[in-house]
Amino acid sequence: TTTTTTTTAAAANDAQKIILHAYPNGDTYIGAMDNSKTNQCIGFGIYKCKNTTFIGEFIHGKRHGYGRLQLHPNRGSYSGEYVNDRKHGLGTLMLKDGSCYHGLFQNGKMEGHGTLRDVRNGTVYIGEWKGGKRHGKGTLTDMTDGSIISSGLWSKGEFVSEET
């Protein structure tokens, strides 16, 4: 069975219903829901399931706008913009191993300009991305001494050539 508790908070000219909704699978949602039969999450809310917690904005039951997704236990996080339930726009992705990407996303993948600090191999890449891979102009630097490893053009994650 689904359990729903409704609290009404006074708004400027109308009442906004804040819902605590418990789903049969154990997931919970605290926030506003639309008034249709679909009961979709809208506006700002907190959605928690077994392995994730999302705090942020929803439209039509999907993450849309700014939000923070925390993967449990300590498996990483994403803070940034969403469109239609996907990372899209500026964001920061923290990986379980401590690596961090800050930059642009498109349809859930790194796309456009961004910086990846990769602790696994001790490098920092600053440059362009396409489809989640290094693509376009970019520079790969050693984190320990700051020396440049590769600088120039990248294609599908591979270094192609130095810029001339």
Image: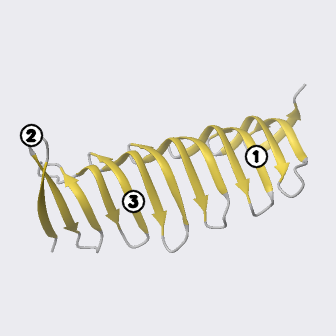
Identify the secondary structure beneath mark 2: loop
Residue underneath mark 1 = 125
Seen from the viewer's position, the closer of residues 31 and 160 is 31
Q: Residues within 10 Å of mark 3 (few under 14, many from 20)?
A: many
Q: Which residue is located at x 74 percent, y 62 percent?
A: 119
Dot placed on the residue nearer the N-terminal end, 2 or 1:
2
Q: The residue tagged with tag 1: helix, strand or loop? A: strand
The crowd level at tag 2 (other Cα within 10 Å; few <14, some 14-19, many 20+) is few
Q: In the orientation shown, which residue stands out farthest toward the left?
A: 14
- Residue drawn at (57%, 50%), measured in percent from left and top? 92
Give residue 18's quadrant in the image.
bottom left
Q: Amino acid at mark 1?
A: Tyr
Dots 1 and 3: beta carbons under 8 Å?
no
The image shows residue 17 at horizontal and vertical percentages of 14, 54
Rendered image quadrant of residue 115: top right
Label 3 SS:
strand
Residue 83 is left or right of residue 20, and the answer is: right
Query: Residue 64 at what x, y percent from top left?
Result: 37, 44
The first of marks 3 and 2 along the sequence is: 2
Q: Position of residue 38 (x, y in %)?
A: 16, 52
Which quadrant of the structure image shows residue 96? bottom right
Q: Residue at x 87, y 29 (%)?
A: 163
In the drawing, what numbered circle is on residue 100? none
Toward the viewer: 118 or 61? 118
Q: Nearer the viewer's eye, disc 3 or disc 2?
A: 2
* Circle 2 residue: 13
Q: Amino acid at mark 3?
A: Phe
Q: Residues within 10 Å of mark 1 (few under 14, many from 20)?
A: many
Contact (Cβ within 8 Å) of mark 3 with mark 2 = no
Q: Which residue position holds label 3?
A: 54
Residue at far top of view: 164
